[in-house]
Amino acid sequence: MKKIQILSFLFSGFSTLVSGQSFQTIQPAALGVHFLYAVYKNPYNSEGKDYKSGVAGLAVSYQKGISNKIELSTTVSGSLLDFFNKKNISLGNNEKLLLLEWDVSTRYKLLKTKKTVEPFIQAGLGGSYYNNYLGLYFPIGLGCQINISSSSFILINLQHRFALTTNQDNHYYFSLGFAGIVGKSNSKISKNLPATPKDTDGDGIVDLEDACPTIPGVAHYHGCPVPDRDGDGINDEKDSCPDVPGILRYKGCPIPDRDGDGINDEIDHCPDTPGILKYQGCPIPDRDGDGLNDEEDACPDVPGPISNRGCPLLTEESIKKIKKAAENCFFETGKYTLLPKSFASLNEVVVLLKNDSTILLNIEGYTDNVGKPKDNQILSENRARSVMIYLISNGVSAPRLHAQGFGQSNPVADNKSAKGRAKNRRVEIKFKTIFTSGT
């Protein structure tokens, strides 16, 4: 389907040529005579492309305003041509016949007040009659009315008419005409009316009596705004705190903050106890009541001394069991499968963790420098994870354990000797908590 191109127009250079006059702006009834020039589609040329050509004609119009910006208009136009419909079929049998078109449109004036030059836009509905064929179209366009006197004016109109039926086709329409008021005119010009007192700020108080002529105000303050010293949008007459910005809910005063923690009472869940915003104005919690708040407490649910970051102290026996278990973790060569001889020591760790729910462990894997660093890194991670999985499979809660591999980094012996490399292939089990010696 062929795309429809919409004609766009640019009107510029309009200026107001009439000043110092007062007009009634509702357009009275008027009749007009117009010269038209329309561009219709012709059949295919020798190159197989359709083309357009212009046709002149005459038109008459009637228009009447229904408000100061809206007018109704109707136009009847005629022109002689060989007319082709949407399917490029000649409806005149290749003869020039009379095409009659009639439309009813609504015009919308673009200026607020009546001027010498008044641009407008318009749209409506039209019909055509040609050699016993009827068609419908939708006209839309721009125009302007140039007022010559109080009872006559020139009309310029440019339209694009969109076909609504197959017996009509899209076309462009341009007209230039002269129109005059018919019957009794209600458009009166009063050239010497008394000048209206000026009110620059539009507050209903004329400038001669307005102490603030460029700022809208009220009569009580001689045309100036009601004062608002603190600039909170609540005028001083209703502001209980006129020198401190506030909100309307508190009559112009700030939202209260009884505990002075910088968090206003409307969002403070502990309005009488200083706190922090992260906890909605409440103090940082201390769930285990050991005097160390949860953000600093490594064991927030179990009481412990501040010296041990809020965790209970570990016994020397517990420390030894963990160390022994780490030293007795054995794997298949080059693999991460735990050997059965590792189970006895790890089982002691299981018992220890079940008896003391405060213990949290980091399990770290290391390798020697034999092989590729990337492969060693993966192997160390998998070995640490194998130890963690063994403990979990025997009843230890997963959140209490963390496994991490460090590959061939952080050696504890020289990798140049077999004995040193053996020491570097290791698993270390460390407490997450700080421990001190005790019984």
Image (cartoon, helix red, strand yellow):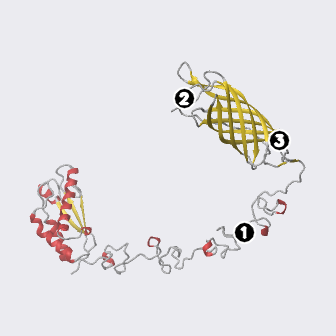
Q: Can you identify the residue that label 3 sits on?
A: 182
N-term mark: 2 or 3: 2
Asked if residue 143 lies left or right of residue 312, the reply is right
Decide: is 259 above or below 379. Answer: below
The part of the image, by quadrant, that contains residue 326 is: bottom left
Check disc 2 and give the amino acid type. Answer: Lys
**Mark 3 element type:** loop
Closest to the camera, between mark 1 and mark 3, is 3
View extreme (right): residue: 192
Residue 250 vs residue 42, the one in the foreground:
42
Check disc 1 and give the amino acid type. Answer: Pro
Relative image position of residue 33 (x, y in whole percent):
77, 33
Q: Can you identify the residue that label 1 sits on?
A: 227
Relative image position of residue 184 (x, y in whole percent):
85, 45
The part of the image, by quadrant, that contains residue 296 is: bottom left
How far is the residue under mark 1 from the one under mark 3?
56 Å
